[in-house]
Image: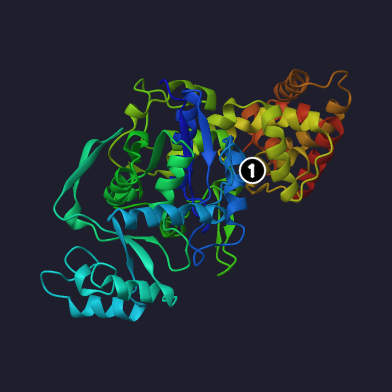
Amino acid sequence: MATKVRVRFAPSPTGGLHLGGVRTVLFNYLFARHHGGDFVLRIEDTDNTRFVEGAEDYIMETLRWCGMEPDESPAAGGPFAPYRQSERKANYLQYAEKLVADGHAYYAFDTPEELEEMRNTFKSAENPSPQYDHKLRMKMRNSLSLGEEEVSRLISEGVPYVIRIKMPDNQTIGFTDMIRGEVNFSTSTVDDKVLLKKDGMPTYHLAVVVDDYLMKITHAFRGEEWLPSAPVHLLLWNYLGWSDAMPQWAHLPLILKPDGNGKLSKRDGDRLGFPVFAMNWTDPRSNEFTQGFRERGFLPEAFVNMLAMLGWNDGTGKEIFSMQELIASFDMSRVHKGGAKFDFEKAKWFNHEWIKASSAARLLPDVKNSLTSAGISVTDDRYLATVIDMVKERCTLLPDFVEQSGFFFNAPASPDMEPVKAKWNLDKNLFFTDLPGVLEALPDWNAVAVETAFKEMAVARAIKVGELQLPFRLMLVGGKFGPAVFDIAATIGKDEVIARIKKGLESLA
């Protein structure tokens, strides 16, 4: 590609970032990095009624957590600043006025009441949802239906107006989608969208075209729900004389509910018990809380890996990819046309694989945070690293480390010896009464030394080792889980093992 690749993610700051939004970021990011291009974050905040305090910071934090920092953004700046559309308001009016002057758009003075009346008056069996379009525009109050003098008078008197695109009747227009191939539309099915609102702010339709042009965006990737808007955008690129500079488009498939029946929503996550946002989000207006993947215990590497495989693969069957591997392998032609079903069990599988493959040093800050949040004090990072390597294969989500490793830091409050009580006898009781003395006398303290002493003592007393290992585990761990019991003993130390044995015996008394 001769021209430098420039892609953008252009969210509205209206709330938390849904899985689909993060995947759109990811595909933009991977494409830009694969081609040595620029990744731009542009905040599309032109709708004041939907603006939510804190949403922009949330978006930035999500990208940081995922390892997808933009090259240009409101925070980082860049050669095409500002990167908030609200701060670019002065740019849009001239282009809207040019469209009016060239006959491709018009002023519309209709009040909300008149628009509602239109929808009721012209409703029929053939047209159950009347739109402001080529059929009805001449019946409304706009610069096409009114005389020039009347239009001038209304404008001079400050009567509020919007600027609408004048959609041509019965034309077929199309483009080549990087995923879907040739896509065509009939202009007759599209209404005259508002381009500039009464407050002088552009709508998405005008702003996205103007800003993509001014910011020299070469490729625009967005969800397939934006396909119906494509005819308006195609015409604007053409009407403004910028056809040669229009980005290549790719409309990404939807992320579907687990049953494949419709787009995945936050309600589905609430209903089925899994997150659909990247991070925790509390809506400041409603105070509604939504849990995120980060706080549920996902590693960002696993989250990104999982998202990449929702609608893309490299053709080899490989599933585990680092960010660098994704960048090297990413090809838009491998993105599927059809929607991708979200499977939370599969998402957890990715996380489990990443936890197993990660070093203790990589996991340490996250695991320490999980333990501290659960009230477990960690004072020795080297000890924690040892523990992490012992238990990580048993952990699917980060909070699992609390149960799987908590006993390395705190003795079980009251070990549950119930599973061995039915077969408990005097011989076993004597074995564990005498075991602390044997362990105390060991000159070396390691797993092999503890296991050897334990088994020799069992053989000498004619007790099956298998019948002794479960009570030993219950005394040390507090439950039927954890790594090899002699490894646990070696790790927690001689004094702690002896203390826990004595406490276990008390529970069996």
The answer to whether 478 is drawn above or below residue 178 in the figure is: below
Q: Is residue 509 visible?
A: no
The residue sitting at 30% across, 53% down in the picture is 102
Q: Percent position (x, y) of residue 7? A: 46, 35
Q: Is residue 109 above or below residue 88?
A: below
Secondary element at image label 1: helix
Neighbour tally class for label 1: few under 14, some 14-19, many 20 plus, Cα within 10 Å: some
In the rendered view, tell whether residue 122 sits above or below residue 491.
below
Instruction: Locate residue 352 relative to residue 109 in the image: left or right.
Output: right
Q: In the image shown, does 465 or 245 lie closer to the viewer?
A: 245
| Name of the residue lying farthest toward the left | 126
Which residue corresponds to the image point at 32% horizontal and 38% vertical from the top-left?
243
**Quadrant of the drawing holding the N terminus:** top left
Q: How is the image coloured?
A: rainbow
Q: What residue did someone put label 1 on?
A: 420
- In this rendering, the answer to whether 132 lies above or below 391 is below
The answer to whether residue 231 of the structure is visible from this angle is yes
- Residue 395, horizontal then vertical, whole percent: 59, 37
Viewer-proximal residue, 342 or 477?
A: 342
37 sits to left or right of 189: right
Residue occupying the point 69% across, 31% down? 388
Q: Position of residue 437 (x, y in %)?
A: 87, 30
Q: Give the camera-side residue of 402 and 58.
A: 58
Q: Which percent across, then down, holds residue 301?
A: 56, 33
Depth check, front residue: 467 or 483: 483
Q: Specify the amino acid type for callout 1.
A: Val
